[in-house]
Structures are given as C-alpha cells and as structure tokens.
Image (cartoon, helix red, strand yellow):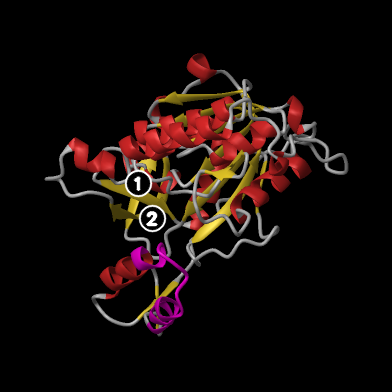
Amino acid sequence: MGIDYRQGQGTHMQKQQIEQKKMELISRYGEWTVTAVHLGHGVWTQSKHDTPPKRTRRFVQIVEDLVGKEIANCRILDLACLEGEYSIEFGMRGARVLGIEGRETNIEKAKFSSEVLDLKNVEFKKDDVRNISVEKYGKFDVIICSGILYHLPADDVCPFIYKIHDMAERLVILDTHISLSPTMTISYRGEQYQGHTYTEHSPDDSPETKLERKWASLDNDESFWFTRASLFNLLSNVGFTSFYECFSPQHQLPKDRCVFVAIKGRPIDLMIFPGPDHSQDNWEEETFLVNDTDSDEIRKRLERLNRLENHPLIRLGLKLCRSKKVKP
C-alpha cells in the first residue's frame, strides 16, 4: 500500500515551509495547471481539489490489473510528465519512477512536489521524449505515454513508438488523440500509416513562445495524428503481442481521444495447429461521413475544439458533418 497522503503523511517539511516554497515557484513559473496534489498539512498544489483525478485512477488500475507484479516492485517511465501527477502517485505506491518532461516550468513543480513528499524513489529529468533510448535510460515495467503521441511530427512519431517498445518490459499505456479525418499517408520501414496533421504553432513563433504553450509541442509546428487502424497496425508491426482499449474505470473522453494498453509479451504457437504462425493481418481503415468539399477543414476545426471539452454543440457539429459516406 502507498502512503496515506490524505492524512498528511510522507512530508518532512513544515506547513509554512511548503507554502513559502510553493509561492516562490508560482511567482517564477505560474500556477499549477494540472490536477491538484496534496502536499500535507492541508496544502495543495491547486486551490481547486474537490474531485479525484479520474485519468490517474484509470492508469493505476490498469497497472494493478495487468503488470503481473506488485506496483512497489515496478520501474515506471512517465513520458511528458507535465507537473508529475502520475509519477508522484506511483511513487507514493513504492514504484521507482522516472518522469521525463521538456519544459522547465513543469519539471521544477514536479521536483518540488516529490521533495515535499520525500519521494526518494521518484526522479525527474528535463529532456525531449524523442531523445529517449534503452542506452540512455534503461528498461521499464510500465511506460506511460499520456498526451504526447499526438504532439509529435510525422518524421518522429514512428521511431518514437519503436523506442518505447525497446524500453518496455511489459506495459505501455497510450492515452492519445486519433484521427477521425485522415488526409495523408506516411511511410516507415516499408509500411504505410494514415492520419492527418494538426497545427501546433505558427512558423513565425519564437522558441520562447512555443515553450510558453504548455499544451502544445515543444518545437515542431505540426504534429501527426494516426487513425485508429493505423495506430493498431504500427503497434503490431513494432512487436507488441496484444493491445487493448480501456473503458473502465470510467473517464469521459472526446470521441477522438482513447486509452490503449499495449503488452509486450511472448508470441504463442497454437498447439492444435502445429508449426509457427506469427502472421498479422493489417487493420482496415474505416470510412467517414462528410457532406461537402470543405469537410476536411470543417472536421479539423471541430476536432480542435473537441479537445477543449466534449461539448454538446461540438458533438452535434461532428454529427452534422457526416451526412454522406466517402472513402478517406
């Protein structure tokens, strides 16, 4: 069991020390932007803390159910960890955790929380997730890839998936947007994958401006979103032996946001059918419903709005945009 942080256990600092350091960080880097973390003595990273984080609960339950060992015996990699929410939760459960984050504003807040909670088993490093490798960071029982895949450009996203497969011992959690309106095809290692590009920044934006956008890519102006079928094909081609979509514990997501769990296991041979057969049929791309020549741009704009909230008006717009069947 992890520390019962709701009772203020785990911190080695006094309330006044925590509050003073927190205000110093806010003065320098701004307010916390992700889920609130309780730091002990009634102090939270955010003032609003009335609802437990559903996404974190889902990730912990996935690992508890599927990793095959006690969480306290796991080594976990949290990619693009923002302010360290998942890293801290798993660290409080005893896991050895490494959080990778590209923005200093997020890293400093994550380090502060782990320091206050005296989590010596949690480490944070400032790095671009595209730089990870087995040689640099080693292997992990669990890799959390939440909210980062759809921020990577077409040239980098496939190599990134190959890297996390190499670094995974058992589980990879992929929380990502998928393309509902494919408009382009990319090629990698002789395979083709469909999706669409998404605008992250303007080409005229300075590096400083890009870093200030905490919910965008680090530096690339465009990112690539896979269709569901293409992402499945990539996971198969990389070598994951099975993968699943998670629906429970419940966490309401937009239609184009999904949580997948990829398992790196051992390919089996059927005993009733002698001889190895590791062939894998590709998933077929879906058809989409649109109604005019401007539908691609309309769908792109609606999907961008859909990232804000699963708003009824946005959902209605997507529905109206699909009144005629066409091939992507």
Spot occupied by residue 129 in the image (x, y as percentages of width and height): 42, 31
Asked if residue 135 shows in the view, the reply is yes
Q: Residues within 10 Å of mark 2 (few under 14, many from 20)?
A: many
Q: Is residue 270 left or right of residue 138?
A: right
Q: Is residue 130 left or right of residue 19?
A: left
Q: Residue furthest top?
A: 135
Q: Residue furthest left?
A: 204
Front residue (pair 294, 282): 294
Q: Quadrant of residue 204?
A: top left
Q: Mark 1 and 2 residues: CB-CB less than 8 Å, in contact? A: yes
Q: Quadrant of residue 115?
A: top right
Spot occupied by residue 215 in the image (x, y as percentages of width and height): 36, 49
Q: Quadrant of the N terminus?
A: top right
At mark 1, the secondary structure is strand
Q: Quadrant of residue 15?
A: top right
For disc 1, the marked residue is: 186
Q: Residue at x 63, y 25 (%)?
A: 12
Front residue (pair 4, 131): 4
Above or below residue 151? Residue 313 is below
Spot occupied by residue 258 in the image (x, y as percentages of width and height): 55, 57
Q: Residue at x 54, y 36 (%)?
A: 238
Residue range corresponding to the magenta coloring: 304-320
Identify the main secondary structure in magenta.
helix
Residue 292 forms part of the magenta stretch:
no
Give the amino acid type for the residue marked by disc 1 in the picture.
Ile
Numbered tag placed on residue 195 in the rendering: 2
